[in-house]
Image (cartoon, grey):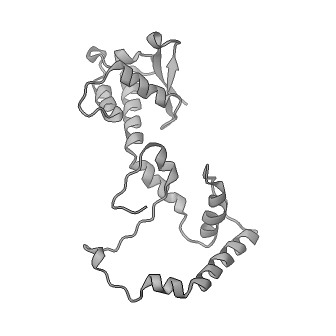
């Protein structure tokens, strides 16, 4: 997939890596190249494939494989392809994940809400309806929820906040998570738990 200044959000952030091509010019579409890359690859395909297979085979047989963290759901790719690149002293493609996560609007909204909640209520369990009460001293929290829940100008309801909180229940972010306290929907309270 290609695009300019792409933003990934939510669960998609774990499914992408970035490859940033910067032509360092205002109109990259007007670049001229010394060779036709498509024609070159077709003409030299055998050499290129052999070189790639030699790299993979050498890595597979190497005793000095780099220790790299696992990449959940993509373990085989991480071990073989990513491992080979790192072993060949090339940049680790996994490092682009930090930029993807930093620019994730869903993660950013979650951080804003959990920090504003902690500031307004500490670890005290609170009902979703109380969060929206302007007398509760949670104006910053309401603003954060408006951004995170994304209702574009519509007034938030306790039900919408409750749905959002259910989706974040136990999801750890910056060492904190929301925890459901209480049983049925009417008495459900939510608290920030620090780990």
**Whole-percent x, y for residue 18 in the image:** 45, 60
Residue occupying image coordinates x 38% and y 20%: 159
**Whole-percent x, y for residue 23 in the image:** 34, 74
Residue occupying image coordinates x 65% and y 81%: 50
Locate the C terminus by quadrant: top right
Q: Describe residue 21's horizontal placement relative to residue 137 as left or right.
A: right
Q: How many marks?
A: 0
**Whole-percent x, y for residue 25 in the image:** 28, 75
| Residue 172 drawn above or below residue 49 | above
Residue 145, picture quadrant: top left
- Closest to the observer, 1 or 111: 1
| Residue 152 drawn above or below residue 65 | above
Outermost residue, top side: 187
Q: Describe residue 195's horizontal placement relative to residue 142 as left or right.
A: right
Residue occupying image coordinates x 51% and y 26%: 193
| Residue 55 drawn above or below residue 191 | below
Residue 76, picture quadrant: bottom right
Q: Describe residue 31's horizontal placement relative to residue 174 as left or right.
A: left
**Whole-percent x, y for residue 83 in the image:** 64, 64
Residue occupying image coordinates x 33% and y 61%: 4
| Residue 47 drawn above or below residue 171 | below
Locate the N terminus by quadrant: bottom left
- Closest to the observer, 73 or 137: 73
Residue 186, picture quadrant: top left
Q: Describe residue 11's horizontal placement relative to residue 148 as left or right.
A: right
């Amino acid at each position: 997939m290609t695009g300019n200044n792409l933003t990934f959000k939510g669960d998609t952030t774990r499914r992408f890596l970035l490859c940033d091509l910067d032509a360092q010019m205002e109109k990259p579409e007007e670049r001229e190249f010394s060779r036709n890359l498509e024609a070159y690859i077709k003409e030299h395909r055998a050499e290129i494939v052999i070189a790639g297979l030699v790299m993979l085979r050498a890595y597979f047989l190497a005793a000095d494989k780099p220790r790299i963290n696992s990449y959940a759901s993509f373990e085989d790719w991480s071990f073989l392809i990513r491992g080979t690149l790192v072993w060949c002293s090339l940049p680790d493609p996994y490092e682009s994940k930090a930029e993807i996560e930093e620019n994730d609007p869903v993660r950013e909204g979650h951080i804003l809400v959990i920090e504003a909640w902690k500031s307004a209520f500490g670890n005290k369990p609170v009902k979703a309806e109380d969060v929206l009460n302007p007398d509760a001293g949670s104006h910053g929290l309401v603003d954060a929820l408006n951004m995170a829940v994304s209702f574009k100008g519509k007034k938030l309801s306790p039900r919408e906040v409750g749905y959002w909180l259910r989706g974040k229940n136990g999801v750890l972010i910056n060492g904190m998570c929301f925890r459901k306290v209480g049983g049925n929907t009417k008495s459900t309270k939510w608290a920030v738990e620090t780990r």
